[in-house]
Image: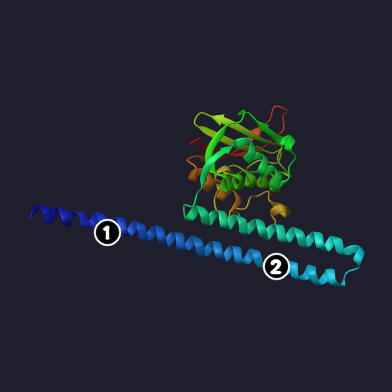
Amino acid sequence: MRDRRMQFGEMPVLAHAVNEMAERLEKQLQDQRALLATVSHEIRTPLARMRLLVEFARDEDPAKRDKQLDELDKEIVGVDGLVSELLAASRLDFGALRRTELIAYDIAKQALERVGPPDAVLEDRTEGATFLGDATLVARAVGNLLENAKRHAGGAARLRILERGPRIAFEVDDDGPGFAPGEEEQVFQPFYRGKNEGENKGLSVGLGLALVKRIAEAHGGRAYAQNREGPDGKKGARVGIELARS
């Protein structure tokens, strides 16, 4: 009899756990639907522009054709970046991290080569520090930090690599307008578009820094954003990640 009472007493606990799991699954499905709807809308625009650019290039004077092809190339790069972000997000959803020993400096160099700022912005204070992480995802996170500075402030003023106890940090400084009050937390929310994004938003759907945060947390760390004032008196933003060393 006592065992039966204990079993009945556990039923509400089990029911509550099942309900919580169902709510989490429903929220994930809602987020997936919102993401698919947003991305579908965002991809249609560049695809339509690509079709027009191809038609213009066919009929255009050969002297102007290079400009049309450059515009087409920009659109293709934008779509490719968006697809890459979605693939990275799906790897996180399925917990498909492949951890290997990484050299922090190499990750930063890889991100710089992809995004484009000169190597001169790189400041490594770790003397060859290593950590365990997924090379593709961490490079994507650092690249997104650089892309964020490019979008909001014309480019990164500095990419710094630091050691903070059991964590390794990558942080990007820019000389832009910084964050509005309270925006430091909002920038990591999915689909958030900054107030200063303006004409530089490109194909952004507000997933870049949201993905950065998820990658940092999947590596036992965190993402952070703050306004800064440099030693030269210049103001701007600082956005970074800290990752567990092991």
Q: In the rendered image, which quarter is residue 78 located in?
A: bottom right
Disc 2 and disc 1: Cα gap in Å? 48 Å
Q: In the rendered image, which quarter is residue 173 located in?
A: top right
Find the residue positioned furthest to the left.
Answer: 1
Q: Is residue 21 left or right of residue 139?
A: left
Residue at 72 percent across and 29 percent down: it is 233
Residue type at tag 2: Leu
x, y percent for residue 81:
65, 56
x, y percent for residue 107:
62, 40
Residue 114 in the image: above or below residue 47: above
Q: Nearer the viewer, residue 162 or 224?
A: 162
Q: Nearer the viewer, residue 56 or 106?
A: 106
Numbered disc in front, either 2 or 1: 2
Residue 212 visible to the viewer: yes
Mark 2 / mark 1, whichever is N-terminal: 1
Q: Is residue 169 left or right of residue 75?
A: left
Q: What's the mark number on residue 7? A: none
Figure colour scheme: rainbow
Residue 50 in the image: above or below residue 18: below
Residue at 67 percent across and 47 percent down: it is 147
Disc 2 element: helix
Q: How many marks?
A: 2
Residue type at tag 1: Ala
Instruction: Count residues near mark 1 (Cα–Cα under 10 Å), then give few for <14, some for 14-19, many for 20+.
Output: few
x, y percent for residue 238:
63, 38
The quadrant the N terminus occupies is bottom left
User: In this figure, which residue is indicated by the disc labeled 2?
Assistant: 47
x, y percent for residue 9:
18, 54
User: In this figure, which residue is indicated by the disc labeled 1?
Assistant: 15
Q: In the rendered image, which quarter is residue 45 located in?
A: bottom right
Residue 204 visible to the viewer: no
Residue at 45 percent across and 59 percent down: it is 28
